[in-house]
Amino acid sequence: MGCAAPVSRACGEASSTAITCRWVKKKGGCEPHFVVCSRYVFAQDGEDDAGWGCAYRALQTQCSWLRLAGLSARPVPTLGQIGAALAALGEPVAPRQWIGAVETALLLQAWYGLDCRILDAASGPAVAGRVEELHRHFTAEGSPVAVGGGVLAWTLLGVATAPDGETRFLIMDPHYTGGDEDLKSILKKGWVAWQPLSVFRKDCFYNFSCPLVSTLPK
């Protein structure tokens, strides 16, 4: 089993979601545990990004993890700041334009000086071939992974493989619009949940942006 490293609520971050990395196959699901990162979703902070902002929210979640882990004091960027930073890097995006996992990696490198490893999968079923590498990432680095595929993006917080080989993926899904911050409700509705391999579509190409915190400047 490999999961994003649990961290304390170190920097006064608001709206943090607490989850566990335990998956019991006969029951499935997950339960509250320690704070891992802040949960960023559509329409948060009064910004209307439904339909295009999922990768921006995944990047915000990654930035919040670095902040809560005490690895950076940098504030979590707004959607506007993300777009401006991409333009400054020579990768301009139009207003309300979707970005992917590769762009999140570019910004993490620019802002924090850390490298990101990009793992790709030609289809949903091909993600199975990346499971061992994802296990190693969470064991060695512990950082959340931005996942982009088709026109969707998620944050991957962990992977767990049962003795019989079945694997589940702990996914934080930003495609939620509303003010419901009750953890039990969030988990019950599946916005943070252990998902089977079939959650990855057969007709989509996927990129996994894995921040290598071991490369952070000392």
Image: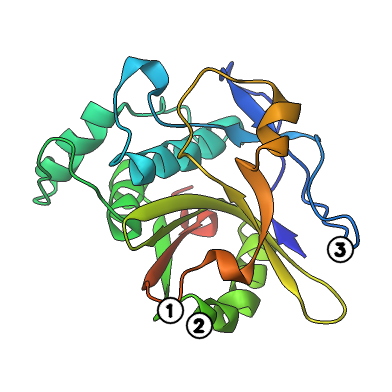
To which residue does mark 3 refer? 25
Q: Residue at x 33, y 51 (%)?
A: 104
Q: Amino acid at mark 3?
A: Lys
Nearer the observer, 126 or 6 = 126
Question: How many labels, in total?
Answer: 3
CA separation in Å, label 2 and label 1 = 5 Å
Q: Residues within 10 Å of mark 1 (few under 14, many from 20)?
A: some
Given contact means CB atoms under 8 Å apart, are the residues at marks 2 and 1 in contact? Answer: yes
Q: Secondary structure at mark 3?
A: loop
Q: In the rendered view, does 163 fall on the left or right side of 179? A: right
- Residue 29 place in picture, x, y as percent: 78, 50
Q: Secondary structure at mark 2?
A: helix
Q: Amino acid at mark 1?
A: Ser
To which residue does mark 1 refer? 123
- Residue 32 place in picture, x, y as percent: 80, 34
Q: Is residue 206 visible?
A: yes
Q: Residue at x 9, y 46 (%)?
A: 92
Q: Amino acid at mark 2?
A: Ala
To which residue does mark 2 refer? 126
Q: Is residue 150 above or below residue 184?
A: below
Given contact means CB atoms under 8 Å apart, are the residues at marks 3 and 1 in contact? Answer: no
Q: Residues within 10 Å of mark 3 (few under 14, many from 20)?
A: some
Q: Is residue 142 visible?
A: no
CA separation in Å, label 3 and label 1 = 25 Å
Q: In the rendered view, does 57 fall on the left or right side of 67? A: left
Q: Secondary structure at mark 1?
A: loop
- Residue 62 place in picture, x, y as percent: 48, 43
Query: In the rendered view, how is the structure colored?
Result: rainbow
Q: Is residue 70 above or below residue 107?
A: above
Image quarter of residue 207: bottom left
Q: In the rendered view, does 11 fall on the left or right side of 26? A: left
